[in-house]
Amino acid sequence: MATLPYAEYHIDRAAVRPDHRSGNSIGEKPLSALRLAGFSAVAMPTWGASLPLALFVPQLYASKFGLSLATIGLIFLIGRFWDVAADPIVGALSDRTRSRFGRRRPWIAAGGLLFGLSSALLFFPPAALVTPAYLAGVLFLFYLGWSMVEIPSSAWSGELTAHYHGRTRVVAYQTLLRSIGLLAVLVLPTILDQYDPGNGTLKLQLVGGFVLVTLLPSLLLTLFSVPEPPLPETAPQHGFGRQSFWRAASLVFSDRLLLRVLASDTVVTAGQSIRAGLIVFFTVWYMGLPAWASGLYLLQFIFGIAAAPVWQRIGTRIGKREAAITGELAQAAINIALLFVFPGGLPLLIALTIAQGVTQGSGNLMLRAMVADVSDAHRLRTGHDRTGLFFSVFALSMKLGPAIGIGIALPLIGWAGFSAGPGNAPEALEALKYVFALGPALAHIAAALIIRRFPLNEAAHAEIRRALHQRDATAA
C-alpha cells in the first residue's frame, strides 16, 4: 500500500490514477475567461471598499462628525473581533445550506444587499444621526455583509473545478478583479486631490459611489455567470453524522495542512503590511521625495495587477508550491536590495518598486488556491465537505497579518527614535530603512520555509480527487 506524503491519507496508487486525458480525476470542460471574470466580479466592490474603510473613514468621522480618535479606534477594534468571529460562522452555515438556489448563492445574494446598505450608511452618513452607536452599528452590518459575500464566493471558487491547475486559474481571476477594485479607489482620490485637495468628505463619497455603482451589476454577474456544482456526496459507510459547528471548527483548526497554509499566508501579509505601512515614511522622510509617496504605491499596484495572469501561468507550469516559493524568495531579494537605495536614488527605487509589484501577489494567489486542495484532502479523511469553513479560516490571515506587521514595525521604528516629521536623526532614518527593507524580506523567507515541504502537489491532488470520485460513486 503506497501512501501520500501526508501520512493520514492512505491511497492505493495502483487503483487510483489521474486521468491524463482530461487533466483531472472526473473530467470537465474548462470555464471560459469571460465566465470566470463574471464570477469574480463581486470582488471588485467588496475589496475596493476595504481600503477607504482604513484610510478615509476614521479621518472623516473624527474631523467632520466630532468622534474622538480613541472612540473610533475602540469601535474598529471591536468590529474587527466581530469580523473574525463572523467568518467561520458564515462558512460553516453556507456549507450546510440546502436550497433550490444552491448553498453559496443565497448567502452571496443576501450578503450583497446587506453590504450595499451598510456601505451607503458608512460612506454617505447623515450628519444628524452620526454617533458612536451609529458607527458601531453600521460597521457591524458592513463586516457581516462582507463575510456573507466573501466567504461563500471563495468556497464556491474552490468548487468550480476539480483540476489542480484550474483552481490556480480561478483564483488568478479573483485576484485580478480585487486588484482592479483596489486600484480604482487609489486612483479616484488621487485625481480628486489635483482639483480639490483636502476635501475628505468628497473623497469618501467618491469611493463610496464607486462601491455602490459597481455592486449590483457585479453581484448579478457573480450569481449567474456559472452554475453551482452539485452537492458532494458523503461517505455514509464511514458513519459520519451531522456534527455541531464547534466540533467541525475544531477539526478544521486542527488540520495540519490548513494551518501550514494559514501560517504562510499570515507571514506573507504581515511582510506586505510592513511595506505598505512604512512606504510613505520611507519615501517622504528618508528619500526626501514627498511627491512620490502616493505615486510609488500606485505604480506597484498597477504592475501587481498586470502580473496576476503571469503568475497563474507560472503556477500551472511548475506547480503551486514551487511558484509560491519562487515568488516569496524573489520578493525577499527585492526587499533586501532596498538597503542599496540612498536619498536621491530614485531610478533604483522605481525599478525595485516595479519588481515588487510584479511579484507581490504570487504567494497570496498560490496559497489561496491551495486551500481547496486541502479541503479535498480533509473530505477524503473525514467524509465531510467543509470548503466554506476552510476558506473562512484561511481568511483569518488577511486580518492577522496586517495586525502583526504593523504591530511590530511601528513600535520598532519608534523605539529606534523615528517620528513622522522632520528633524529625525540620521540613525533613526537608517533604522527606518532597515525595518522597511528587512522586515518584509524576513517575512517572505519565513513564508517560503513554511511551505517548502507542502505535500499536496499535482500528483497527490489527482490521487485524492480520484479516490473521492470512486468513493462517491460507490456511495451512490
Image (cartoon, grey):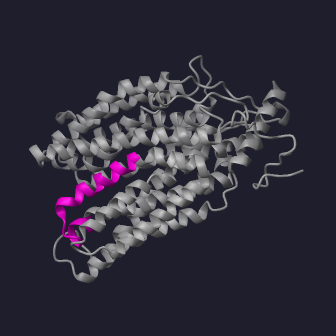
Residue 12 is covered by the magenta coloring = no
Q: Residue furthest right?
A: 1
Q: Is residue 233 left or right of residue 205?
A: right
Count of marks placed on residues: 0
**Can residue 448 be seen in the rendering of this structure?**
yes
Q: Residue furthest left?
A: 195
Q: Find the magenta span and give its range.
A: 281-306
The residue located at (31%, 64%) in the rendering is 278
Closer to us: 177 or 17:
17
Q: Is residue 254 left or right of residue 398?
A: right
Task: Residue 287 in the image: state x and y as whole percent.
Answer: 23, 70
Q: Examine the rendered structure and indicate whether residue 83 appears above or below residue 404.
A: above
Residue 340 picture quarter = bottom left
Majority secondary structure of the magenta segment? Answer: helix
Residue 208 picture quarter = top left
Q: Is residue 246 left or right of residue 308?
A: right
The residue located at (78%, 52%) in the rendering is 4
Residue 159 picture quarter = top right
The residue located at (47%, 47%) in the rendering is 310
